[in-house]
Structures are given as structure tokens and as C-alpha cells.
Image (spheres, rainbow, N blue to C red):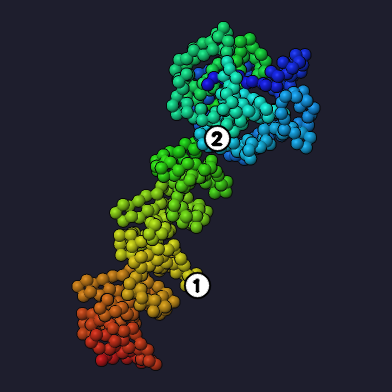
Amino acid sequence: MTRKHRIDYRRIYMLTFIFSMAATMSALLYASLPAVNAIHSAYSGFNAGDIISDEVMSDYGSMSEAEIQNFLKSKNPCNDTNIVKASWYPRMSYHIENGHFVCMADENFDGQSAAHIIWQAAQDYRINPRVLIVLLEKEQGLVTDTWPNSTLQYRSATGYGCPDTAACDSQYYGFRNQVRNAAELYRYILDNGSKYYPTGQNYIQYNPNSGCGGSVVNIVNRATSALYQYTPYQPNDGVLNTAPGVTATCGAYGNANFYYYYTSWFGSTHTVSSSQMIVNRMTEVYDNVGGADVFGLATSGVEHNDTTGIYWKNYQNGVIVGNDQYGYYESRGGIRNTWAEQGFESGVLSFPLSNIMHNDTTDIYWQNYLTGVIVGNDKYGYYESRGQIRNVWHDQGFESGELGFPISNIASNYITGIYWQNYTGGVIVGNDQYGYYESRGGIRNAWAEQGFEGGKLGFPTSNIQHNYSTNIAWQIYQNGLIVGNDQYGYYESRGKIRDVWADSGFENGRFGFPTSNIYTNGNIQYQVYQNGVIYYNTATGEVSTH
């Protein structure tokens, strides 16, 4: 495909219709071009072998759809009310509403705006939307044209399928078709190189007329190859030494004007925008975590939350999120749902710090965040894991330990000031004042009967401990202990009654294991053991046994 300088169909038609108006048409064509302040100024820095870098052409996150729309409107507010011009070309079609021409920024193409079509093509083919905007101007002047014709300018909006030596191919007609085919071609060459203008030494003409000559150009990147495959001519000195729109003998303006419009509107054709840096990092994550096989296709461009400073891009099966400070990571599935419930980066977990990881042995998934972790699997669910509660779970051996998998997020009782998290094998409970400890099995049931932290025992102050020789387990609380085993049960052990039991040798002594909690009858407290009872008179302080 070779087509390569802007076709102005209105001018062609006008010359065949009435030659005497050619001067008027020329004035219309160039009325909007800026005045030249100095020779070379428009094309300063142009390098025929390095017109635009691969990175800049690939900067598909450089503009959001809204930014594209705002840019188009800033260049052309679509308020041309001189509709008499439409009568000058009776065989052309113009869109006129409310007494003014509708320009590209406000046009509707089968229900889609030009901005959306440009943005979507940019995302789908990973091409800088600025490149596509410049192409539309270079080929048909559609960005700045206040009265574009629907018949021909939109039909061949990017000049795709319009060779210099033949009519345009009708299979490529249509604004959306034109934009997407152009983007697809650029992407193909960026990925695979150009068959006709590969990187390296190439003879490139100055004009479609071979008699105008040419020179060998060292093409240094694929993006420049793509421009030459689209427009296979380089500007000669006459072009580069005159203003845009001023005709130079044997000149071809396509690639010179591409450079001129891009640098005038968007700056350097070689400086990668910060958005491209973000896109590059996100693409690296996308590829590293499985690409389309895992994430599917992109469903949005790069988006940004100005308040939290996070960037994200949506895919069919997940999201890639992050920023330059913390990095960019995958976010998907049950782990993402839990992060959403936590308020994303504004919640307690803040920003992700890793991709999703998996332990094949225990079948647990987790992802690290700035202030914690989300862990779990499809069987038990996905939950936060952070702070001292996570430290206790760690000490217990995570999911391989007695507590197993988490089955809830962290909850709290603001009245008593306790925090807890449920696991398949128990609970971790506590607060910063008393610490965080496991709570499970018969000991937990006994604590529950005591009223948890609101009961006589108060908060736990240790994990569960064991004496395997006597087969007893216990846990210490603010105001006592819970002791026992599965054979005899688990009971409170506190105060004077505990002191007597201790003096007797605990479960190794003459009383053996406790078989009841402490009962109260008036001033008398007592507790039953395997081999007797211990009594305590709270009024007199007297202790007796039976």
C-alpha cells in the first residue's frame, strides 16, 4: 500500500468544475496555516532516517478518550456558520446542523465519536493516539477543517488503501475503517518490520515523480519505516527550507508535515511521555503474568486517580494497577474483590506490592500490600491478613499450622476493644494493649462460656501451651487460666483455688485434673477435681479441701 500525500478532493473537483476559482480554493486550503517566522523553523530537527521513535509511536496511553475529545475541540470548535460554501461543491455532501457545519470533533460515525474511534484503535493496536490524530490532519486536514465533506474526506480519512497510481480501494472506505487499518498497519510494522522500507539503508524518492530524484536514507527504527511504508517519500531541501503549505519544486510534504504537526501539537517525536513509561511497565506485568491467556484483552486505556495517585488498566479478566512509587502489579479474581471491599488503595491495605503468588502444596494464594496481605483460595475465600494478627498466624505456621486458613476479615468490638479473625481451626484475638493470641478448641469454648473478654477472665495474654507428658493444655488470661484436655474437659483456674491446686502439684498432685469451673455459693467458692474439691471462703480467706 503506497499513498502518500494529502488528497484534497474538493480542490480536485473544483478544478474540473471551474478553473477560474482555483485561487480561491488555494486560499481556503492554506488560510489556517501559521505564518513562518524563520526559514526551517517548522521542520527544525527533522531527520529523514529517524522521524519518530518506536517508543513514541507505541505510546498508546498518551491520551484518554476525554483528552482526545478536548484536544480536537481546542483545535476546531466546529462553529463555521458560512454554510454558503456548501453550494460551491454540489456533488459533495456536508453535515450542517443549526446553521453551522459539523466538524470531525462533533461528528457521529455509526454511533461513535471520532475521539472514541481514535482512542479504541490506539488501545487495540497499541499505537499512540497522537500519531493517529496527526495522520488524520496530514492526510485530509480533518482536525482543523471546519467544513469537512462526508462524501470523500471521511471516506478516505487516513488515506489508507489510496495509492498514488490508482483510485482508492473501496473496501477500506469509512472513517472507522480508515483509522483502524492505519493503526493496524503501524502496529504490524512495529512488531514485524517493513518489507518495503526496512531499517537500514534505503533509497527514498523526493516525489512520486521519479525524475525528481531521491537519496539513500539510513532508517534507524521501525516507527520511521512505518511512516515510509505509508508515505514513501522524503522531503527535499526545498520543502524543508520553506513554510508548510508553500509549494517547493519536486517536493513531497507528507512526512515533513507529519513531523511538523506532531512537534507543533505534542512536542518531541522522540521523548517518551510519562504515560508511555507507565504503559511499558504495565505491559511487562501483563506479559509476565500470562498475557492474554490469563488476562484476556484490554477493555480500557490507562486511567488515573488524581487523589490517590494510582494508575490502572482494565482487561477482560482483571486489572493491572500501581504507580511509580510502589510498582505495577496484577489485580484479579477473589483477591481483587477483597481489595475492593477494603476500599482499594484508600483502604487499610493501601497499594499492592507484589503480583499474586501461590503455594502448590497448601493451595493458598496471596498478594502483598503496603500494610498487609490478602490470602486464601476459592474453597475458603480470600481475606485480609495484617498486623499482629498476621504475626501470630505466621508463628502458628500460616495455613499449615493448627489454625489453618482464614475464613473472615479482621473484625472488632469497639466496646471491649478486642480484634479477631476467624480461621478454619480457630481464632486469633487480642489488641495492642494485651497482645494477640490464638483461641481455639475446648479452651476457646470454655472462654466463650465465661463471656470472652467481657467475662471474669478478661483478655488472653498467651497462646495455648501444652505439657505433653501429662497431656494438659492451658492458656493464660488477665485474671486466670483455662486448663484441661479433651478427656476431662477445659475449665477456668484462678485465684486462691488455683494457688491451692498449684501447691498440690497441679494435675500431677493429689487432686488431678479439674472437672468443673469455679462455683460460688454465698461467700464460698469451690472447684471440683478428679480426686476432690477445693473450697475458698471469700469472707474469711480460709481455704479447705475435701
The label number, if any, that marks residue 121 in the structure image: 2
Amino acid type shown at disc 1: Ile
Q: Quadrant of residue 258?
A: top right
Quick one: label 2, few (<14), some, or many (20+) residues within 10 Å?
many
Residue that extends furthest to the left in the rendered view of this protein: 469
Q: Picture coordinates of residue 192 (x, y %)?
A: 44, 26
Q: Kindly identify the residue that appears in the image at 43 percent across and 54 percent down.
A: 335
Q: Picture coordinates of residue 483 (x, y %)?
A: 30, 77
Whichever of callouts 2 and 1 sits on the residue coming sooner in the sequence is: 2
389 sits to left or right of 314 = left
The label number, if any, that marks residue 415 in the structure image: 1
Amino acid type shown at disc 2: Ala
Q: Nearer the viewer, residue 482 or 157?
A: 157
210 sits to left or right of 149 = left
Q: Is residue 198 above or below residue 324?
A: above
Q: Kindly identify the residue that appears in the image at 36 percent across and 75 percent down.
A: 445
Q: Picture coordinates of residue 401 (x, y %)?
A: 30, 62
Whole-number angstrom distance, CA of label 2 to CA of label 1: 56 Å
Residue 395 seen in this snapshot:
no
Q: Picture coordinates of residue 389 (x, y %)?
A: 39, 62
